[in-house]
Image (cartoon, rainbow, N blue to C red):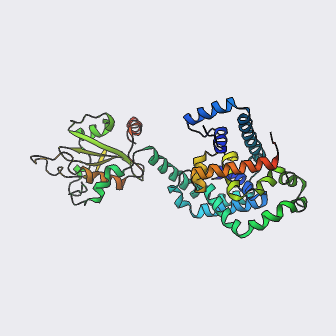
Amino acid sequence: MTITPEDIAAFADGELSDERDEEIAAAVAADPGLARQVNQHKALKAMLAEHYAPVLDQPVPDRLVAMLAKSQEPDVADFAAARERRETRRRLPHWGWIAGPALAASLALALFLPGTNDETEVYADTQLAAVLEHTLVASQLPAEETRVLLSFRTEEGQYCRAFSGSAGGGIACRDDEGWRLEVLGEGSEGATTDYRMAGAGDGEILALAQEMASGSALDAEGEKEARVRGWR
Amino acid sequence: MLALLPRLRRFAIGLSGNPHDGDDLCQMTIERALSNRSRWEEGTRLDSWMYRIMRNIWIDEGRKTTRSMQTFVAEESGVRVGGDGAQEAAVELSNVDRAMQKLPGDQREAVLLVMVEGYAYKEAAEIVGCPVGTLNSRLVRGRDALMAMLGEAT
């Protein structure tokens, strides 16, 4: 087995893969010369760390602090918000694989904002509201009449859920009153249609959901937490 | 960002070799970070992002000035620093500082990122913008040089 200086350094830093780490550990244990090199690396690291550590305890010069203080509030808010968005995105599935193809497709399918004609239609009815309130994407049955496609949050922090069902799909967002229907898709206007192709229109709904969302869809944990809080 | 300042200063002082230039480097880094803050979201971690900004500025500035400093200041710093006050002199004149300043820049930043700032090789390579293998070999060369200069430090 060839052992390079890079191996020894990486071993001292704990940077080797498990397999390689075991190999090098065995070689080091068998060879006092290698062991001495490892110790030197560790000693050097400790020495450098110690040498620069006092800087951390020194007061930061006022002029540097002042630069941040000047832009403190937007700064903190921006970065906190950006971090939040970014971490959410990293933790959760990306939209791309769900809605990407639909985004590329046209949004020609009839999607309309409900409530423009009749105020009573603005909120989900009791049955739909019950589904939206209680169903978790991860645990719903495939044969469920109305299925929740996914959940997300808007820029304003409102929870919304995209759903699909024989009576049509759409997107509803939770507010003080209940589940306000933001988008209704194909089928919803034709409760009397003879058939509805499974999943037809879901892509468009998801594409719209993506536009409304800030960050990614909630994952299973996120949905559970949101449900406990009543989606508020 | 405020919480990162002490660490940024440490990296800056390590790169530039003395607190005065280090704080100037910090200042430029903060300026650039603030004016580019909207672009941060695309990055990975705030600290890595700021370290990357800092080392890029350092490289740019280095092309202008550091070459002469590296050649002369190390030897003359005793005199120069002596005027600044005994405490700083004690810090600045240590063997470690001198040895670090003699390292080529790419080795110095690799050594600082991994051995002082505690980044994993992969993270350090991302900050520097080079492959992990390259970082690894720079690190080894830097370490060997330091050990040679500092003697059997152990």
Identify the residue at image location x=62%, y=35%. Answer: A24
Whether residue B47 is visible here, answered yes or no, is: no
Residue furthest bottom as drawn: B64
Q: Position of residue A104 (x, y in %)?
A: 29, 59
Q: Quadrant of the C terminus of chain A?
A: top left
Q: Looking at the picture, does residue B42 appear above or below residue A33?
A: below
The percent position of residue A183, horizontal first and vertical second, equals 27, 53
Residue nearest the viewer, comparing B112 with A83: B112
Residue B86 visible in image? yes
Q: On the rendered structure, is A153 left or right of A171?
A: right
Q: Nearer the viewer, residue A104 or B125?
A: B125
Instruction: Name the spot of residue A3 as percent of width and height, x first.
Output: 63, 40
Q: Position of residue A172 (x, y in %)?
A: 30, 47
Q: Quadrant of the N terminus of chain A?
A: top right
Residue B13: quarter of image: bottom right
Residue A148 is left or right of residue B77, and the answer is left
Instruction: Please tell me which residue is depicted at 32% across the width and 44% down the height of the picture.
Output: A150
Q: Nearer the viewer, residue A88 or A97?
A: A97
Left or right, A180 with reference to A143: right
**Which residue is located at x 20 percent, y 54 percent?**
A118
